[in-house]
Amino acid sequence: MIDQCDCKKIMATYETLFEIGMKALQRVGVLEADARTTMDVLLCADLRGVGSHGIQRLLQYVPRLRDRLINPRPRIVVEPMGPALKQVSGDNGLGPVVGTRGMKEAILLARESGIGYVGCRHSNHFGAAAPYVLLACEERMIGIAGSNAAPTMGPWGGLARLVGNNPLAIGVPCEGDIPFLLDISMSVAARGKINDMARRKERIPEGWALDSHGRPTTDPLEALKGFGLPMGQYKGYGLAVAVDILSGVLTGGGYSTDVRSLVYHWEEQTNVGHFFIVIDATRFLSLEALSESMKRMYRNLREAPPINPEQPVLISGEQEAKLEMNRREHGIPMDPRVFEILKGLTEGKYDYEIPKF
């Protein structure tokens, strides 16, 4: 979901935020190249309107880096598993660093074999999934990315937190138009959004969550004690488990309750896993032919009569792509308080409440 800006926010340039992030990460021991990779991923999310996975994640990453719950200088190991398969062991490094390495290895495999699958283990929260599939699209390839996360949902019909709100993204390049980009997680509403509504003492909509006894609730505090609900009911549950299998079970890493929370577990590593699949579509047809077919599909979708004339039909990723162009030119909206805390990280000021989103 794209963030909504209000008049109380300030506008910060991409360059300003990038510099702040670089300084904050290097101050706690992250190498310059890894800090740059991390900021590329986080600020991509901010540009595309997903601030919950943007630079403000440093407010969680930096304390874990300081406590060595995230390794600031990991020795990442890449192991070939077959002609089109690799496994990346992240040495508990920053998720964007491990994830970017995984996607780049998958791109190399696809260039050699037509397809590549890379599983990553011993990683951390990797931000939004969209930046990774965009890397594949930039190489004129199809990208698929997924990650597991600490459990916040129950299995469909069950009363135990065993299923993470695991994201999945798919990107397809299209010369002359935007890439198709689907980036979703599996719950009806993010836990961070429920936290925000609890702080504002607002009720949550029906269908978002169950309380600890499995009863539907509109009380955000009871929802936080209970379980988030998957989108599409059992379908979202099944998708979340599938992503967990591909990210954790298959990689030999953490899965289900082995994966720990970024913000609630301060004595353990998070043990997150990811997977990346890249397909060289030009093995099937030329990039020109692929793009023409994609644009024909886009035209069909966009020309559908809209239910609301003021809201035309959009392609997945179109709204975010337009927002990115706008924010590169006019800046990224930031909460002034968060902006000041982020600047404080560059000076070693760490006395703030760690956000629980």
Image (spheres, rainbow, N blue to C red):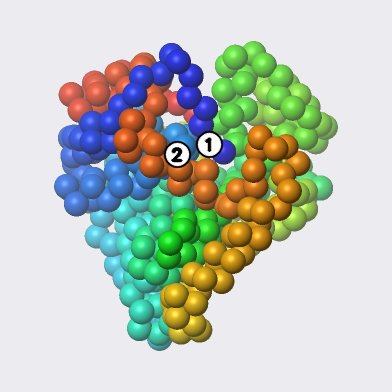
Asked if the residue under mark 2 is in contact with the one under mark 1, i.e. CB atoms within 8 Å, the reply is yes
Residue 210, compared with residue 80, is above or below; it is above
The Cα–Cα distance between marks 1 and 2, rounded to whole angstroms, is: 9 Å
Q: Which residue is mark 1?
A: 2
Foreground: 310 or 262? 310
The circle on residue 111 is: none
Residue 54, compared with residue 219, is above or below; it is below
Q: Is 282 situated left or right of 166 in this image?
A: left
- Could you tell me the amino acid type at mark 1? Ile
**Can residue 213 be seen from the camera position used here?**
no
Q: Please report the residue visible at 52 percent of the width from the left and 50 percent of the height from the top.
A: 317
Foreground: 335 or 148? 335
The x, y position of residue 198, in whole percent, is 62, 19
The x, y position of residue 311, in whole percent, is 65, 38
**Can residue 223 be seen from the camera position used here?**
yes
- First of labels 1, 2 by sequence position: 1
Q: Which residue is mark 2?
A: 323
The x, y position of residue 332, in whole percent, is 36, 30
- Could you tell me the amino acid type at mark 2? Leu
Q: Please report the residue visible at 28 percent of the width from the left and 62 percent of the height from the top.
A: 76
Residue 217, compared with residue 297, is above or below; it is above
User: Which marked residue is nearer to the observer: mark 1 or mark 2?
Assistant: 2
Q: Please report the residue visible at 65 percent of the width from the left and 47 percent of the height from the top.
A: 313
The x, y position of residue 221, in whole percent, is 67, 22
Q: Please report the residue visible at 58 percent of the width from the left and 16 percent of the height from the top.
A: 199
